Image (cartoon, grey):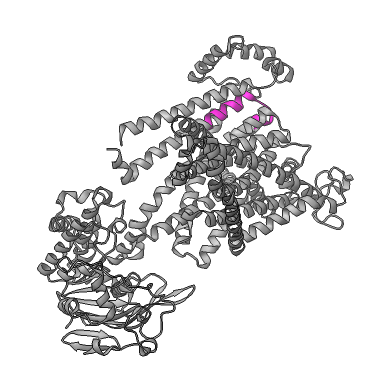
Amino acid sequence: MAGNSVKAKLRKRKIKAFVRQVLANKMALFGTVVLLLFILVAIFGPLLVPFSVLEFGEVEDMLNPPGPGHILGTDDMGRDVLGYLIAGSRISLLVGALATGISMVIGTVIGIVSGYSGKVIDNVLMRITDFFLVIPWLPLMMVLAAILGTSIWNIIVVIGVTSWAGTARVVRSQTLSVRENQFVERTVSIGAGSGHIMLHHILPNVFPLVFANTILIAAAAITSETTLSFLGLGDPAHASWGMMLHYAFETGATSTGAWWYFLPPGLCVVAVVLAFTLMGYAFDEILNPKLKER
Amino acid sequence: MNKKRLVKKLLYAAITIFFVLVFNYFLFRILPGDILSMLSRSGKTTPEMVANIREMYGLDLPWYQQFFVYLENLFTGDLGTSFIYKKPVAEVIGSRILPTVILLGVAEVLAIVVGIVFGIVSAWKRGKAIDTGLLSTSLLLYSMPTFWLGMMLILIFCVNLRLFPINGMVTPGRVFADTWAYINDVVRHMILPMACMALVMIGEYAITMRSTMIDVLSEDYITTAKAKGFSNGYVLRRHAMPNAMLPMITLIAINLGLIVGGAIQIETVFSWPGLGNLMYGALVNRDYPLLQGVFLLTTVTVILANLLSDILYEVVDPRVKSMGD
Amino acid sequence: MKLLEVNNLKTYFKTSKGMLKAVDDVSFDLEHGEALGLVGESGCGKTTSALSIARLLPKEGRIVGGQILLDGRDVIPAPESELRRRRWTDVSIIFQGAMNALNPVMTVGKQISEAIVLHEKASEADALRKTKDLLELVEIPSDRYKHYPHEFSGGMKQRAMIAMALACDPKLIIGDEPTTALDVMIQAQILNLLERLRRELSMGMILITHDLAILGETCDKIAVMYAGKIVETGSVKDIFEDARHPYTKRLIGCFPNVKGPKAVPDGIEGFPPNLLDPPGGCAFHPRCEFARDLCQVQTPESVNVGGKHIVACHLKEARQ
C-alpha cells in the first residue's frame, strides 16, 4: 500500500531527528558514551583479561592493594580484582537488561490494555498496579527471592515482576490520551478489532514514552540486582558487581580498609546507573512535549 | 473533607492491606515440598516446635480454614514464633522498632530540611554555578546504591579518619557512668548511618523541590507579588513556598517505601540493631515466621503512611478541599 | 507636572539568538487622570513597555536607554529599595489572564490586604475593612474575601484583580489586556467599571490591548505601536476619524463597524516582524501598500500633524 511507504519515510525522518537531538543534548551524549563503553568492555573484556575469574591465588596474594601484576589488587581469595570486575560487568548488565525487558513488556501490555479497555478491566488492573506501587520494593524482592531461590533466572524474574507498575501507569495515561484521538475512532468505525488497534495504532504512539521510561527502569534494575546480591540473594555461580560487594563486606574489606575491593565495583554501578539516569531524563525531555525546559 | 471520598480512600487502603495479608499467607505455602518435613529436616527446629507450628497454623486443616486460623492469629497479635530467637515474633519485632524509628526519623527530618533548602537555592539561582553543583551532587547521590555509600562512609570516617565507631548502636561491654554518657555513645554510633540515610534522600528531595520551585517561580502570581512591592524573601516565603510544598508532601509519602529499602541496607552495613537488620538476619537464616512478620509490619506501615499523606494533602490544598463539598 | 513621561525608552532582551529590541525608542506621556490606550499586534512591545514602567522586567530584559519620569522622578536609575516603596502606591498592574495572577493557595482577601498592610502600615483589621470596601467597589459581595481564587468565576477574578490593583490608591494603573480572556458581555462590564473608577478616583490609566475597538469608550488618547516603535499617537478622535499612518488605518479597517456598510474587513497581509532582525528603515514597509524606496532605508521621525497628533511616516499625505 502506498500509505506504508509514506509511513516508513516519516518514521525514518523522525528517528533521524531524534538522534540529532540526542547528540546535541549533553546529558544524553554522556550517558550513551559511558554505556557503550561498559557494553564493549562487558562483551570483549574477558578476552583481554588473561585471568580466569575462578582462579584462586596463593595465600600471600590475598587482599593485596594495587601493585605490579594486579592493577586493582586482589580479593580475599587472591583473585585479580580487575579481572573479576570485568567478568562481573557481563552479569550485572545482562541481568539489568533482561529484567528491564520483562518489566517493560508487562508494564506496557497492562498499561495499554487497561487504558484502552476502560471500566472494569481498567479498575482491576489499576488496583493490582497500585498494590505493586505501594509495597516497599526491597522487602518484597527479598521475600520473593528467599522463597523462590537465588538462581540467576529467579533474580531476573523477581526484579522484572516487581518493577513494572510505574511503566504501567505512565503507559496507561498515554493510552488514554491517544485513545481520544480522532484517528482511533475512525479506525474503530471501519471495523478494526481491539487487538489490531492496540497493536498497530496505540503502541507506536505510546512507544517513545515507553522508551524513555525503560531507560530509567534499567537504572533501577541494575541497582536492584546489586542490592539483592549484596544482601546475599545473588547467584554465587554468576558473580556480578553486587556479589563482589557482598563478598567484600562479608570478608571485612570495609573494616580493614581494603578499598580496592569494594570501591571499583561500586563506582562501576554508579557510572552505569548515572549514565542511564541522565539518558532517561534527556530522552524524557526530548520525547515528552509537556516537559520542555522553560 | 468529603465523607464519601474519605471512605473511598479508607476502603482502598483496607483492600490493599487485605491483599497483602493474602499474599503474605500464600508466601508460606508456595515453598516447595512439605513445609513441616522441610522444617524438621532443616535442623533448626525441635519436634515440639514442629508440632507447635502444625497446631498454630492448623496445617492439618483444609486450606480455607487454615486461612482463617491465620487471620485469627493475626488479630490476636500472634505472628508465630521465630526459629532463631525461639520467641514470639511479635516480641522480637517489638524490641527492634525503636532503633529503626530513631534512625529513620532523624534522617528523614534532616533530609527534608536540607533537600528543600538545596532545591530552593538551586531554583532561585537557576543556571548558575551553585545550581549546577547542587544538581550534580544530587544526581550522583541518587545513583549510588545505598549500602555502598555506607561502606564508603565507613572507609573514610571510621577506618581512615577514625572518627566514629564502625558498627552497632552502643559500644559493646562498656559500662556507662550515667544516661548522658549512654546517649553520647549512641549518638556517636548513630551519626554515620543517619548521615548515610539522609544523603540518599536529600538528592531526590532537592531535585524535586528544584523543579517544583522553578515552575512556581514562573507563575504570574509571583510577578504580581513582586509588583506589589514585597521583598524577594517575602515573595519566596509567603507566595512561592506554600505552592511548592504541595507536591513535596506527595513525594515524602512515596519515599516511605524507599526508606524501608534504605533502612534494611544501612542497618546491615552498620550493624544497627533495628528492623532492617532483623529482616536481613531472618533472610540469611531463612527464619520464615520472622521474615513474614517484618514484611507484614513494614508493608502495612507504608500503606497506612501513604493513606495518611493522601488525606493530609487533601486537607492542605484549598483547591482540592472545597472540591468535595 | 505630568503624571508620566516616557522619553526615548529602549528595552532590549538578551536571547541565545541575539539582542531582541522589544522597545526601540518609544515616547509618550500621560497627565494625571488621563487614560492612554496602547495598541498593536502581539509582540509589538506593549507589555514590555508596561513592565519597563513598573520596572518588573524578567532577568533577560534590560532598559538600555531613555527616561521614565513618574511625577517628575526618573525611575530607571532608582535603587530597588526605593522602587519597592513606590510599587503599588504609584503604579499598579492588572495582568493578562487573572487565572494565573492570583495565588491559588491564598484567600483573595489576604492577597488584597497584604499590600495595604505593607504600604500603609495598617493593622490587619483596618486592612480587612478597606479590602471589603474595595470588593464592594468592584461589585463583589464583601464577605467573599475569605474565599480562594478557584471559587471565583472568570469575570469575578478579573474584578478581584482590579480591586487588588486599587488597594493602595495608585496614581497610575496599567491594565495589560485585562479583558482578553473574557466573553464580550463581561468585557463590557469590566471596561465600564474601569472607566467609572478611573474618573471617580482620577487615576491615570494605560490600557494595553490588541483590540482597538474597546479603546474608543475608555481612553482619552491612543498610541499605536509596531515592531517596538510608536507609529502614531493622538486623541481618540484623531485616531478614529483622522488616522494617518497606514498601519493605523489598516487596524481600524480590521474591525467591523456596526454602523458602517456591511463589508468583510481586510486583514493585513504578511506576518509580524522578527524583532531579532527587523526590516530596515520603517519596520512596516514589507506590509505597507504605499511603501516607497525611502521607507526601506530610513526610519521615519515623528512629526506633529496638529494638536497632540503625532505620526512617524515618510508619506506626504500622512504628514500634512
Please tell me whether residue B288 belongs to the stretch shown in magenta.
yes
**Total number of numbered discs in the rendering:** 0
Choose between B318 and A188: the one closer to the eye: A188
- Residue B236 horizontal/vertical position (percent): 37, 60
- Residue B19 horizontal/vertical position (percent): 51, 26
User: Which residue is situated farthest in the left direction here?
Assistant: C200
Q: Is residue B60 left or right of residue C228?
A: right
Locate residue C156: give its quadrant: bottom left
Q: Is B47 located above or below residue A91 in the figure?
A: above
Q: Quadrant of the N terminus of chain B?
A: top left
User: Which residue is situated farthest in the right direction here?
Assistant: A58
Is residue B60 among the parts visible in the rendering? yes
- Residue C308 horizontal/vertical position (percent): 18, 84
- Residue sitting at 57 percent across and 30 percent down? B295
Q: Is residue B193 left or right of residue A249?
A: left
Q: Is B175 located above or below residue C298 in the figure?
A: above
- Residue B131 horizontal/vertical position (percent): 51, 63
Q: Is residue B74 left or right of residue C215?
A: right
Q: Quadrant of the C terminus of chain B?
A: top left
Choose between A143 and B283: the one closer to the eye: A143
Q: Is residue A182 left or right of residue B62?
A: left
- Residue sitting at 28 percent across and 49 percent down? C150
| Type of secondary structure dominating the magenta stretch | helix
Please tell me whether residue A55 belongs to the stretch shown in magenta.
no
Choose between B270 and B56: the one closer to the eye: B56
Locate residue C224: give its quadrant: bottom left
Is residue A181 among the parts visible in the rendering? no
Q: Which residues are magenta?
A: B281-298
- Residue sitting at 26 percent across and 62 percent down? C180
Choose between C236 and C24: the one closer to the eye: C236
